[in-house]
Image (spheres, rainbow, N blue to C red):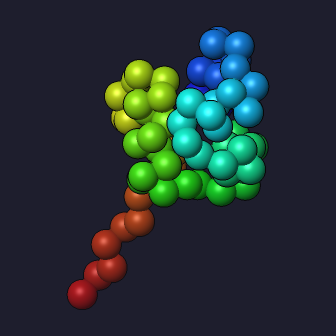
Amino acid sequence: MTLARLRNERGWTFDELARRSGLARRTLIDLEHGRTTGSVTTWHALAHTFDVPIEHLLGTLCNDHNPPRPKDS
């Protein structure tokens, strides 16, 4: 996952990422392990923390995802 890769590339622990982002350590662990999807506000904070476009983080959420099909009227 992108979040784990970015964190590991910088050598940051969850505690360090929490300090830098202002997010709760538990939230970061849950995001990284896929136990929660997070809010746009959370991903926005992480994008700023890692200095990457938010699309870089959110793009992985769309992998292997098929959008719902419109219902026939």
In this picture, residue 29 sits left or right of residue 62 = right
Residue closer to the observer: 34 or 24 = 24
* Residue 29: quadrant of the picture: top right
Residue 51 visible somewhere in the drawing: yes
The answer to whether 54 is drawn above or below residue 69 in the figure is above
Residue closer to the observer: 36 or 13 = 13
Could you say where residue 17 lies in the image, as x and y percent from the top left? 64, 31
Residue 64 visible somewhere in the drawing: no
**Residue furthest left as drawn:** 73
The answer to whether 22 is drawn above or below residue 8 in the figure is below
Residue closer to the observer: 37 or 45 = 45
Residue lying at 49% horizontally and 49% vertically, measured from the top left: 42
Rendered-image quadrant of the C terminus: bottom left
Could you say where residue 21 lies in the image, as x and y percent from the top left? 54, 36
Could you say where residue 44 lies in the image, as x and y percent from the top left? 40, 42
Residue lying at 58% horizontally and 54% vertically, measured from the top left: 37
Could you say where residue 50 lies in the image, as x and y percent from the top left? 48, 24
Residue lying at 74% horizontally and 50% vertically, measured from the top left: 26
Rendered-image quadrant of the N terminus: top right
The mark total stands at 0
The answer to whether 5 is drawn above or below residue 3 in the figure is above
Residue lying at 48% horizontally and 57% vertically, measured from the top left: 39
The answer to whether 30 is drawn above or below residue 7 in the figure is below
